[in-house]
Image (tube, rainbow, N blue to C red):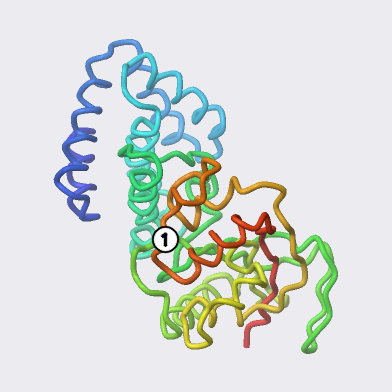
Amino acid sequence: MLKQYLAEFMERFEYSEEDRLVIEKAFAVLEASGEAYQEFLQFLKAYDEDIKCDFTSMRLRMKEVSAKAGIHEYTGFLILFICLSRSLKRYYQEAGYSEEIWFTSMCDLKYKLDECKEVHGIVGTFVPEWYGRFYSLMRFAFGKLQFEIVPFRREYAKKGVVLKEDSRVINVHIPRTGTKLDRESMNASYKMAAEFFKEMLGDEPVVFVCHSWLLYPRNKEVLSEKSNLYAFISDFDIIEVEQYEDYKEVWRLFDVHYDGNVDHLPQNTSLRRAYADWIRKGEKTGCGYGVYVYK
């Protein structure tokens, strides 16, 4: 039954034939592993019985299960999350959330698969810690963006809106969907998220926040004012800027880890070329935290 669900899921989400074969082969190895497979099934049972089960412990133990079975841990994580998605769909139904939101949210598994292949050359996911909030009905995807309610933990007053440390705001994540995030797509995502979370927020204003390297102010120096990324950054009032002490995070832009040689970084876009130049000069990169008061 799990094998069938795995196949149906990958077909529905349009995984490539090559990726399907790798995942199916890894699952067959896991299934034949005896004790490791039984522990894997216990993970699925625990989540199916209680959405509040210890997801962090499950993730850490899945790394051990993958090693016992003889499959790559990144592939093991992906198999786990795909199999858990069946129970997650039921939790969506019980909460009264649409299957469309479940589908859009689970598209992230493929986004992270593509990223894992690009960065590490492995069919799987290397950020298993990212998925806890998806599987606990706290993070959702609407259109091409992802959202969750978080505490503001700051103070802010502008445009008639006053936010305090305990104010609730909607955090925005920008997944790498492989498609353009144009103005129309952004507006559609913001609108769907605002409508979805409005009841949860009650009388509180609808405010989006984003903490990302994309909001690093220097990015606008090299982006065209007509670009989609420039438009996204411009939605936010950037109230905090952090500069990184090293270049560990630049893989998010270059799809490879920086090995100390700038010439090994792909430089096929204006933003990549700018970052490569900053690194060559020893200049800082970083991230920004911004506020978008939604109207």
Q: Is residue 67 left or right of residue 27?
A: right
Quadrant containing the N terminus in the rendered view? top left
Q: Position of residue 284 (x, y in %)?
A: 69, 58
Which amino acid does the dot numbered 1 rest on? Arg
Of residues 129 and 284, which is closer to you in this image?
Answer: 284
Q: Is residue 44 above or below residue 129?
A: above
In screen coordinates, is 29 left or right of 242?
left
* Residue 167 falls in image quadrant: bottom right
Q: Quadrant of the C terminus?
A: bottom right
Packing grade of label 1 (10 A; few <14, some 14-19, many >=20) is some
Residue 83 seen from this side:
no
Residue for point 42% across, 27% down: 43
The answer to whether residue 34 is above or below residue 126 is above
Decide: is 163 above or below 235: above
Image position, residue 39 (x, y; %):
39, 18
Under tag 1, what secondary structure?
loop
- Of residue 255 and residue 28, the one placed in the foreground of this image is 255
Residue 261 visible in this rendered orientation of the protein? yes
Which is more toward the observer, 4 or 211?
211
- The residue shown at (37%, 54%) is 111
Which x, y percent locates residue 12?
Answer: 20, 54
User: For the point 50% across and 80% down, which residue is it?
Assistant: 191
Location of mark 1 (residue): 176
